[in-house]
Image (cartoon, rainbow, N blue to C red):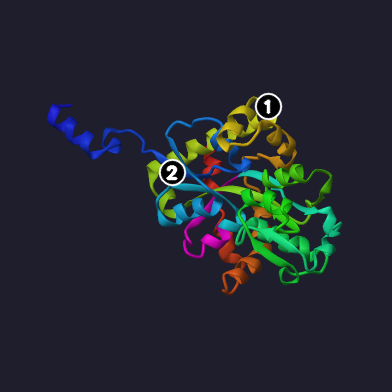
Amino acid sequence: MRRRTFLGALAAGPAALGAEPELRVAVNRTTIESAPLLVREIPGVRIVPVANGRAASAQLVSGAVDAATGSETQALLNSVAQPDLRILLTLAECRYRLVARRSTGIRAVADLHGKRVAVTKNTSAEYFLAEMLGTARLKESDVTLVPLEGEAMPAALAKPDVDAIAIWEPHAQNASDRLGGEAVVLEDPSVYGERFNLNSTVRVLRDPAKRRALVRLVRAVIRVSAQLEQSPHDFTPALAQVLATPEAVIAKVWGQFRFPAALDEPQLRLVLEDMEPWAAAITRRPPRPRATLVTLIESDILAEARQ
């Protein structure tokens, strides 16, 4: 290549030189669910760390990134503004817990009636709370909701500014540890288990170079996830550093997680259908039909990654 041609290609960017484009992925840097994307550097991928799943989804909706992590609740809530949003892969499954103060008289879900419950609004934690309350024939209006971010909940429960919290890990564990014998933990895996996914958009999927990059990313996640399942202790130090969470806390909550690197389409469809009325209610819109929800699941990238 002559010098002038080479310099022109260089100015045009990596694609002009034949290099694959960098894939930008917004990742919630505060949750253990993000582990497959945080414990090892993945070539060709630039992790964009954000404070929560809502921020990650907002980056994807705006087009600032090519993919993002988030719970199925965030996929439902954000696919209204971005109908082209697609769920590509389930990175993690996580069981949530309610933690309450024993001195409030809370021993069961029914005892939450009239109590102050901290929850992060418009998230999977709020959906979990609504579903748990339903097991005792209670509604969100039967408790006093106190909007808080997860990291603020252990202190709020200990003060006590609230009587109970509904949240993901490690915040539930941190609250339980802080209360010690005063802690009452309520959980029911049959009520709700989070599916924390890797999401992208149709625009990115239709870009041949970005699509190839997504396939490579999913292949890497499959490998790392298998290692996380088989030898979690090998990754605990790196994960603890990234999350700024003690290794002992991660070890305590590890049993709450699975890292399947898979896409259970039938089950995910059921979850989206069950969750859609709640998502519609909090965003004050009509629920979408099943046919619309089904389009949010895109299995081709995983199929290509497995080839």
Residue 137 visible in the displayed image: yes
Amino acid on which the number 1 mark rests in the picture: His
Query: To which residue does mark 1 refer?
Result: 233
Up-down relation of residue 110 to residue 237 (above or below): below
Please identify the quarter of the rendering in which residue 4 is found: top left
| Left-right relation of 34 to 24 | right
Q: In x, y percent, where is residue 128?
A: 71, 58
| The label number, if any, that marks residue 211 in the structure image | 2
Question: Of the residues under marks 2 and 1, which one precedes in the sequence?
Answer: 2
Amino acid on which the number 2 mark rests in the picture: Arg
Please identify the quarter of the rendering in which residue 236 is found: top right
Q: Give, as a single range, the part of the protein colored magenta.
A: 75-90
| Label 1, residues with CA under 10 Å away: few <14, some 14-19, many ≥20 | some
Q: In x, y percent, where is residue 178?
A: 74, 44
Q: Nearer the viewer, mark 2 or mark 1?
A: 1
Q: Residue furthest front?
A: 159
Residue at 74 percent of width and 68 percent of height: 143
Q: Are marks 2 and 1 in contact (CB under 8 Å)?
A: no
Q: Quadrant of the C terminus?
A: top right
| The label number, if any, that marks residue 215 in the structure image | none
Q: Quadrant of the N terminus?
A: top left
Q: In x, y percent, where is residue 250?
A: 68, 35
Q: In x, y percent, where is residue 14?
A: 30, 35
Residue at 67 percent of width and 31 percent of height: 247
Residue at 47 percent of width and 64 percent of height: 81
Can residue 124 be found in the magenta stretch?
no
| Left-right relation of 285 to 254 | left
